[in-house]
Every structure is written in structure tokens, then in C-alpha cells.
Image: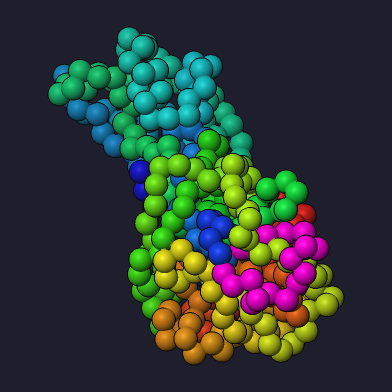
Amino acid sequence: MRKLKFYIAALALALCCVFFPQQAVTADAAGGKYYLGGMTAGFMLGAGGAEIIDLSEVNAEDGVHRPAEEAGLKTGDCICAVNGKQIKTIKELNEALAACGGKEVTLMVRRNGETAEVPVLPVKEKKSGKYKIGVLIRDTLSGIGTVTFIDKETGRFGALGHKVADEGNRLLEISDSKVYLCSIVGVNKGTRGKAGELRGLFLNDKAIARAEKVCATGLYGKFENYDYSRCTLVDIAPLAQATIGKAIIYSTVDGTCPQPYEIAIAKVDEGNRENKNFVIKVTDEKLIEETGGIVQGMSGSPIVQNGKLIGAVTHVFLNDPTRGYGIGIEKMIEEK
């Protein structure tokens, strides 16, 4: 299992409705439509098959073979089925290859959103006696990050505000994905030219939510069997109501409790199509002291102005970690 990377100059996602002071948000708790985020969580994203992360050799009795490479498979390909049988895990792929008895198999492979059938002849490895095709694979990706909102009525959440990508900057396709409680245990501060990051630990093995969808505006899913009684409710406001000036972001940079931090909105761009609707600057001295500004793990941190949720942090400026971009909340609400 390898750690998933989030490409925006390096920011992640988070989920774990742990709670910040009710008085910090001026929206009427009885009338709000969304629970405000800012909480960190760990997540396990199913890759939707056996994803190839490298090609390798198979040492057989008659010499060295490279079945996958010879068949045209590439790093980043995802094996979804063998001889028509669906594959979701490394274990299932190994079982399918063991059952082939050395005969050619037909792999259903997904590449760049398209699928194709690829014939491959497995080779019996000399040392283990197992049939292999010469690939290093993974079926799960993990990471931590920040939730933006949870819908009061449906429990559906939105996080990140930007796409979730692998090392090749490819948008992920996920399945069987879970979200877990997480605690931030340390921070690598951001500096000019280098993004910092939050360091977190999964708190237990009980999932608190399901991650179901990734797209250009973030990661979405649904909280399950969760107690919202101490969460703060808030209304949303469109970009048209956002103004240059003071605002607040909610982030968790220590432990499990989100805290409010002051920022300034320097620019509002309603027409931006790259999810960069705000230019923001961290002005909170405490946050700058603790993190240097915006770091990996803070993307998705909700932006609140005049008591209403207007957007989420998405990008950090590498030449100035106190500055970054944000996305308008309507774009995320549309995808939930």
C-alpha cells in the first residue's frame, strides 16, 4: 500500500466531525443547512482494481520473462478483471492467476478512463512455484485531509475542493473507500519554495464515512451512524456575496479539534474555471507560527465570511505559503 498524493502544490483532505466553539460562527444553528467542516480524517481509497505501480521480471526455470511488459501493460494501468471475473484486490488477482494453470489469461485493463482486453501468458516463478505476470501492484491508497461541509439532511460530505490524483497526476477512480477518525500529531512547516504538511494518525478501525466520488472539485461521500449533536450548523453564501476583506478558515493543525484562523480575501473571481475563485492570505499569527501558513492536509478547510460558508482552501502559493487559492462553495455543493 502506498501513500496517495494530492496535486495542487500539495494539499490533502480530511474528515472527522470534531468540534469547534459554537460562538465562532454567527449563523443561526437552528436554521443552518450544513454542518461546518474543518476536521481531519484518515481515509482508505479502493483503487477499483489492481493498479500497476511498476513492471518487473519473473525468474522461471527456462530464464527471465517479462509477461506484462511484453503484453503492452504500463505503469498506471488498473487490472479490473481476469477472464471476465471482476478483480478488486491483490488477493483476487493472485487467486485468478493461480487458477490459470499456466494458460493464457485475458485481462480487462483500465487506462485513462478507457478499458481494453489484453491477453497475457503467466509464467511459473522458479522460487515460489506461483504463476506471475511481472507486475508490482496496489489495491488501496491512503491519506489524511480536511472536510469542508456535511449536508444536514442527507449526511453527504464534500472535501478538498480540488481533484484527487495519483503520482502521474491522473484523476482517480475509487471503490470500496472508507473514512476514519484521525488525529494530527505534528506539522512540517511550509517555507518559501517548499510546501509543508500535516502529520496524522488513524485513531481506530471503525469507519465514520464512505467516500464514493472524486472529481475536479474534490472528494465526496456520506457519513454513516454519526452523532452530529455538537456540530455547528451554517448557511452557505454564493460568490456574489463574497467581498474583499476579513474572513475565517477552520482547520485542524493539532489533535482532533478544528480551530478558527483569520485570513484576508485579496481577490474574488466568480468566472474562474480552474477552481481558483479566491486569492487568500493567512493573517493569523498563531497559524503562521504553527504551520507557516497553508500546508498539505489543509485543502478543503472551509472559508467563512459574515457567518456564512462561502468556499474552501484549495491551493498554496509555493513562493509564499501564507497565500493561496480557494474555490466557491457552490461548485462543491453541485457535486455532492
Q: Quadrant of residue 289?
A: bottom left
Q: Quadrant of residue 234?
A: bottom right
Q: Position of residue 144 (x, y in %)?
A: 46, 57
Residue occupying the far right of the picture: 240
124 vs 82, left or right, is left
Asked whether 81 or 119 is in front, the reply is 81
Q: Is residue 322 above or below residue 329?
A: below
Asked whether 83 or 27 is in front, the reply is 27
Q: What residue span does the magenta drawing correspond to?
A: 20-37
Q: Is residue 152 above or below residue 51?
A: below
Q: Is residue 143 above or below residue 207?
A: below
68 vs 208, left or right, is left
Q: Is residue 222 visible?
A: yes
Q: Position of residue 45 (x, y in %)?
A: 49, 44
Q: Quadrant of the N terminus?
A: top left
Which residue corresponds to the image point at 72% horizontal and 84% vertical from the top-left?
Answer: 267
Which residue corresponds to the image point at 20% horizontal and 18% vertical from the top-left?
Answer: 129
Q: Position of residue 328 (x, y in %)?
A: 73, 69
Which residue corresponds to the image point at 59% horizontal and 50% vertical from the top-left?
Answer: 227
Q: Is residue 32 magenta?
A: yes
Q: Is residue 173 visible?
A: no
Chief secondary structure of the magenta portion: loop
Q: Position of residue 133 (x, y in %)?
A: 33, 26
Asked whether 196 or 246 is in front, the reply is 246
Which residue corresponds to the image point at 36% horizontal and 18% vertical from the top-left?
Answer: 95
267 vs 112, left or right, is right
Asked whether 88 or 147 is in front, the reply is 147
Q: Is residue 74 magenta?
A: no
